[in-house]
């Protein structure tokens, strides 16, 4: 792999042994992926923040890293934690768990992270077209690449941490022009109506991921409302959950969408396949409706609050969002809380402990959440947001 | 005795019994970090403990949190002694660097296909620079 003089100097330890060790890891990953060189990245987004996923050893590893004195050299945001850092007691979280989570937060902050604790960094940063990023968190990677035209691989938990320190990533995959050319065409003509009528954007995304698995799908003839941010978030997150895809070129949405020059394999999606996805998660009863995977935006909080005003909330509804969204939709969040809705920031249903909140089965509008929650042993119903909100009203 | 050469990725030396799988492995969710046992019911290594074995599988898959799972296993003394992949990808490369576990890929012989005769057999693995060697120590 080609390295610049500056990169060589870091590797040789001229900037300290710790930085050399971190550079060696990035170079090794680059070699394995057969990258020709490294590329400068302007921002990082780190995943693997929840103490539950890290365990004591992982928490200690991040503390040790911060203890060596290394710092993030670029703007670095972070994924959700295992609990709401203000209202953790209400979530039934034990104090020892909160303290363990705070060790991670303190170490990340010491290294210079903005403690955003959200999986939707794209809602709060002005990302430029063509900007190279080192983002982990699959839904954010898909949104940055597919909607904003930025360039990042699914860099992953520990790698994004190291890339944030050095400010470089292996120049390979979705960082390169070649890696962004479509590999398969997905035609949605036969499902666009049913998806639009019933609001099944998340199930559709899950299905596309499951069918395509890897590469860059070129998605044609999608339903028009797919272009709303709300639907795109759910759709792309679901693709990320069922595949290793990091870029989808969507007609009418992706700035890099072009009709393919050569003839590509074509997959068409049938309505019966969407029914199959829904059947995977069709629990008839549920303790709570959980919404916010990916995190709800301020706008979505407002819309949910307005929808609930036409009735009385008589079922448990738990919403997950970012601290930033709560502060800009403060009025709406207060109304939601007054009507008995639980609103939490900094965390989500996948990385927090729903059982600790007395939830054993749940209903959600997110196929990504449905996938991970059923993996954790919960009974799950997947249904569109509209019908879930109707179901909590008397 | 069989000697398999490969691409060295993480340096080190180890000995252990071969545990060979024909399926991709997700460390996050697929392996219990507290016990080192494979908990993915769909996997052909289900219920097997990874501690001290030379683990052979095609490639890793799933969440990148899997690197931390490998680190946790290593710090608890429950990790494989070494890992051989057909093709390694970043989850396992980073996990092995952080955990100090020797790793090689692209073996000159497809050992996954020799699973039935080699499973449980003692082997030694040496990775130096870009060279990895897996040496089977028992007659099969």
Image: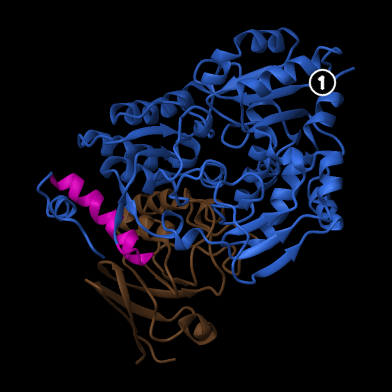
Residue A375 shows in this picture: yes
Q: Residue furthest right?
A: A394
Q: Position of residue B60 (x, y in %)?
A: 49, 63
Q: Indicate the quadrant containing the N terminus of chain A: top left, top right, bottom left or bottom right.
A: bottom left
Of the pair A250 and A275, the residue shown nearer to us:
A250
Q: Who's the residue at 52% across and 47% down the image?
A: A145
Q: Position of residue A137 (x, y in %)?
A: 50, 43
Tell me the magenta residue range.
Answer: A16-36
Chain to which mark 1 belongs: A
Q: Who's the residue at 74% across and 43% down the image?
A: A201
On the picture, is A233 further left or further right than A141?
right
Q: Indicate the quadrant containing the C terminus of chain A: top left, top right, bottom left or bottom right.
A: top right
Disc 1 is placed on an element classified as loop
On the picture, is A254 further left or further right than B120?
right
On the picture, is A308 further left or further right than A69?
right
In this figure, which residue is indicated by the disc labeled 1? A315
**Magenta run includes residue A19:** yes
Q: Position of residue A109 (x, y in %)?
A: 33, 26
**Magenta run includes residue B72:** no
User: How many circles with numbers are drawn on the protein?
Assistant: 1
Structure colour scheme: by chain
Of the pair A198 and A261, the residue shown nearer to us:
A261
Residue B42 shows in this picture: no
Q: Position of residue A113 (x, y in %)?
A: 35, 29
For the residue carrying disc 1, how many other residues have a C-alpha within 10 Å: few (<14), some (14-19), or many (20+)? some
Q: Who's the residue at 78% across and 41% down the image?
A: A382
> Which colour is chain B painted?
brown
Chain in blue, by letter, is A
């Amino acid at each position: 792999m080609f390295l610049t003089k500056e990169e060589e100097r870091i590797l040789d330890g001229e900037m300290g042994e710790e930085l050399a060790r971190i550079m060696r890891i990035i170079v090794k990953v680059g070699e394995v992926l057969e990258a020709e060189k490294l590329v400068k990245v302007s921002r990082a987004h780190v995943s693997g923040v929840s103490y539950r996923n890290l365990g004591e050893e992982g928490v200690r590893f991040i503390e040790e890293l911060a203890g060596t004195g290394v710092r993030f050299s670029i703007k670095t945001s972070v994924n959700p934690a295992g609990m709401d850092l203000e209202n953790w007691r209400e979530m039934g979280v034990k104090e020892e768990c909160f303290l363990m989570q705070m060790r991670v937060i303190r170490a990340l902050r010491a290294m210079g992270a903005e403690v955003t604790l959200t999986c939707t960094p794209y809602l709060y940063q002005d990302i430029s077209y063509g900007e190279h990023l080192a983002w982990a968190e699959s839904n954010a990677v898909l949104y940055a690449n597919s909607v904003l035209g930025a360039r990042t691989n699914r860099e992953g938990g520990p790698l994004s941490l190291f890339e944030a320190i050095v400010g470089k990533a292996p120049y390979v995959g979705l960082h390169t022009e070649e890696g962004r050319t479509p590999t398969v065409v997905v035609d949605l003509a036969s499902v666009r109506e049913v998806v639009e009528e019933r609001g099944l954007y998340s199930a559709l995304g899950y299905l596309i991921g499951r069918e395509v698995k890897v590469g860059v799908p070129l998605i044609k003839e999608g339903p028009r409302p797919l272009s709303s941010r709300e639907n795109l978030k759910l759709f792309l997150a679901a693709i990320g959950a069922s595949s290793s895809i990091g870029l989808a070129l969507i007609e009418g949405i992706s700035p890099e969408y072009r009709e393919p020059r050569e003839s590509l394999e074509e997959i068409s999606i049938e309505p019966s396949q969407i029914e199959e996805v829904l059947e995977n998660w069709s629990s008839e009863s549920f303790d709570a409706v959980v919404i916010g995977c990916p995190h709800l935006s301020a706008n979505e909080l407002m819309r949910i609050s307005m929808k609930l005003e036409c009735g009385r909330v008589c079922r448990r509804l738990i919403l997950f969002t970012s601290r930033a969204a709560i502060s800009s939709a403060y009025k709406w969040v207060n109304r939601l809380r007054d009507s008995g809705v639980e609103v939490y920031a900094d965390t989500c249903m996948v990385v927090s402990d729903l059982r600790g909140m007395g939830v054993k089965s749940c209903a959600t509008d997110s196929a990504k959440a449905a996938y991970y929650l059923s993996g954790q042993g919960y009974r799950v119903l997947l249904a569109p947001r509209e019908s879930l909100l109707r179901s909590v009203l008397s | 005795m069989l000697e398999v050469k490969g691409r060295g990725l993480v340096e080190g030396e180890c000995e252990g019994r071969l545990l060979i799988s024909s399926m991709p492995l997700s460390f996050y969710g697929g392996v219990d970090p507290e016990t080192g046992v494979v908990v993915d019911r769909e996997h052909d290594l289900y219920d097997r403990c990874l501690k001290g074995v030379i683990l052979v599988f095609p490639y890793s898959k799933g969440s990148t949190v899997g690197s931390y799972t490998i680190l946790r296993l290593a710090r608890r003394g429950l990790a494989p002694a070494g890992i051989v992949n057909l093709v390694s990808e970043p989850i396992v490369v980073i996990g092995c660097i952080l955990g100090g576990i020797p790793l090689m890929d692209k073996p000159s012989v497809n050992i996954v296909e020799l699973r039935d005769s080699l499973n449980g057999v003692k082997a030694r693995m040496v990775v130096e620079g870009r060279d990895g060697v897996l040496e089977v120590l028992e007659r099969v």
